Image (cartoon, rainbow, N blue to C red):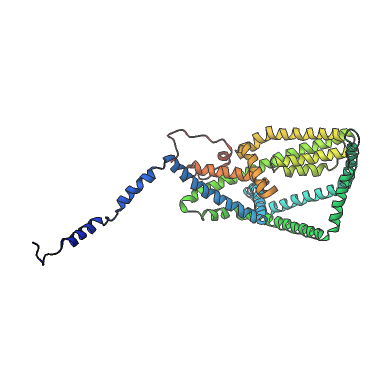
Amino acid sequence: MARAEDPPARPARTRARSTTAKPAAATPAAEKAAAAPAADAVTPGMRIAAAWSWRILVVAGALALLCFLVVQLRYVAIPFFVGVLLAALLVPFSNWLQRKGWPKWLAVTVNELALISVVAGLITIIVFQVRRGWPSLVEQTIARWGELTAYLAAPPFELQLDDINAYFDALFRAISEDTSALIENALDVASVGGHILAGLVLALFTTLFLLIDGRPIWTWVTRLFPERAQAAVRGAGEAGWITLTTFVKVQIMVAAIDAVGIGLGAFLLGAFTGREFPLVIPIAILVFLASFVPVVGAIVSGAMAVFVALVFFGPVEAVVMLGIVILVQQVEGHILQPLLVGAVVKVHPLAVVLAVATGGYVAGIAGALFAVPLVATLNVMVGYIARGEWRTNPHPTVDDVTTPISVPKRGKRAR
């Protein structure tokens, strides 16, 4: 018989049940063990793909941001790039004059004045030649257009050209009556002219300061990187600069050969027909300048030469001029480019075409102009860093950049 002072048994059981029902505190080892099956479910291939993916996204994002800034600042970026290309052409000549004992200021002054004189001379020749041949070109174009319309109106085509003429008349009337549009276009032309003038001044200043302080400027840029990476960046910059200077010199040689070939062909075509081929010098200069834009430049300059031959001479002479253009371009593409440019650029032709197309899509003519030298320079710089040449060859030379790269044998890596 239970006594009254004995404690009840039920609260004891309740305390025991509550004690056993309380969960134990989870330890870090237990949490890791619980999460291990989910991590093990990811295959090694997926882990590698994920690691590569986020790094590629970061690099692509940085490149996209850089391209966006270049496009937004194109009125500054394009003259700067032009100045870099001009400096790449003039720096070797300036250094050669200094090695001959010329003072640095005199060598830089001679280079800058020579550049201004050449640019001004080319512009003067183009303006005077075009002014002299423009009236006859317009007259001949109108005459050829009349012949074409008469030919299309005659059998077997018998096309009705009245509607087309009426459409163009209405279009020209609308343009002439819309004075606000004309004023806006005039302002746009003035704005473009101002941008071009400012760009020329900025390009000349960029060239001047790169001639004076090019190496100190690059040294300052390398100091922005961590100390462990400065040697690699410095050597990669020297390799890229050598590539750029060599590319500019070789491209000028190729462009000069194209201009002389097409210009001489046009002159001989006029001599054989007994008439003067008009605008020979402007066409040659256009071919020279357009040769710096691969693929697109050849098509535009060649089409201009064929058009002038068609307008002034006829379809037969135009076909002959087309054959001359194709011959010159084939010599360039199959002989000059592989022998001269190929040793410098070291970029596959497909990559060149894609680079020109991408540059033209992003930044128009300027993008197509800078695409190939930019890709060639970056290709050499990235390869120089990736192969670790900066450890054994901190100051590359022209032979190191332009000669084919030999793959090191296994077990003989540079330390």
In-front residue for pair 208/160: 160
Residue 348: quarter of image = top right
The residue positioned farthest toward the front in the image shown: 1
Answer left or right for 230 relative to 64.
left
Does residue 299 appear in this view? yes
Q: Nearer the viewer, residue 269 or 301?
A: 301
**Residue at horizontal 78 percent and vertical 32 percent from the top:** 323
**Residue 69 placed where, x, y %?**
61, 55
Is 27 positioned to the left or the right of 299 in the image? left
Q: Would residue 93 be seen by someone viewing this image from the given angle?
A: no
- Give the quarter of the figure containing the N terminus: bottom left
In this rendering, would 116 be left or right of 216?
A: right
- Vertical arrangement, residue 234 with respect to residue 341, above or below: below
**Does residue 391 lie above or below 320 as drawn?**
below
Q: State which quadrant residue 336 falls in.
A: top right
Q: Which residue reaches farthest bottom? A: 5
Residue 139 percent location from the top left of the image: 90, 45
Q: In this view, does 232 lie to the left or right of 33?
A: right
**Quarter the C terminus occupies:** top left
Number of callouts: 0
Q: Where is residue 58 in the image (x, y as percent from the top left)?
A: 52, 50
Q: Please tell me whether residue 222 is drawn above or below residue 1 in the rendered image.
A: above
**Where in the figure is residue 352, as x and y percent of width and height?**
63, 40
Task: Report the residue at 65% width, 46% height from top.
Answer: 359
